[in-house]
Image (cartoon, grey):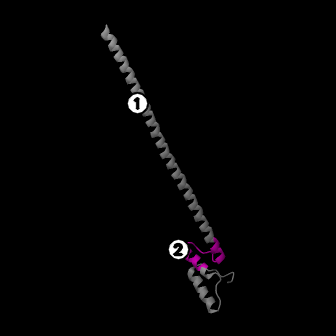
């Protein structure tokens, strides 16, 4: 393929392949380039005009997509960890409140028992008078 010949679309590639076949030749990497140009047309990406340029552009796009996906996964994991920590914190708060309630119940029971004892002792002494 001559340096000044640029193939910018799938139709141009197919025409060039047909012309090469008519002369008994073929375009190197035709099948792969055909797939690349088909992807570009689906995604609305313009061809660079050469197989090497299109291959590099597709690889760059794939790398960008993978990087974005990995970043999304990291953000999702951080969000999931944050929600998990919030749930654990809420559970700990409930446990602390339950423990506090148990302590308050014990104190109230002790206070009631003590005041009952004092009241009973007072009544004993009061009736003895």
Q: Residue at x 59, y 82 (%)?
A: 13
Mark 1 vs 2, N-terminal side? 2
* Displayed quadrant of residue 27: bottom right
- On the image, the x and y values in percent for residue 38 come to 55, 77
Q: Quadrant of the C terminus?
A: top left
Residue range highlighted in magenta: 32-56
Along the viewing direction, whichever of 6 and 19 lies nearer the viewer: 19
- On the image, the x and y values in percent for residue 59 come to 62, 70
Along the viewing direction, whichever of 3 and 29 lies nearer the viewer: 29
Give the label, 1 or 2, closer to the camera: 1
In the figure, 25 relative to 40: above or below? below
Element on which disc 2 rests: helix
Q: Which mark is residue 42?
A: 2
10 Å crowding of disc 1: few (<14), some (14-19), many (20+):
few
Whole-number angstrom distance, CA of label 1 to CA of label 2: 70 Å
* Displayed quadrant of residue 99: top left
């Amino acid at each position: 393929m001559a340096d000044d010949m640029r193939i910018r679309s799938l139709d141009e590639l197919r025409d060039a392949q047909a012309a090469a076949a008519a002369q008994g030749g073929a375009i190197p990497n035709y099948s792969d380039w055909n797939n690349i140009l088909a992807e570009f047309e689906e995604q609305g990406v313009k061809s660079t005009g050469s197989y090497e340029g299109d291959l590099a552009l597709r690889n760059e796009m794939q790398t960008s997509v993978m990087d974005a996906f990995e970043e999304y996964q990291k953000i999702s994991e951080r969000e999931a960890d944050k929600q998990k920590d919030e749930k654990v914190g809420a559970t700990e708060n409930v446990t602390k409140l339950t423990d506090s309630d148990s302590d308050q119940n014990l104190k109230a029971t002790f206070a009631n028992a003590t005041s009952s004892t004092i009241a009973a002792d007072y009544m004993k002494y009061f009736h003895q008078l």
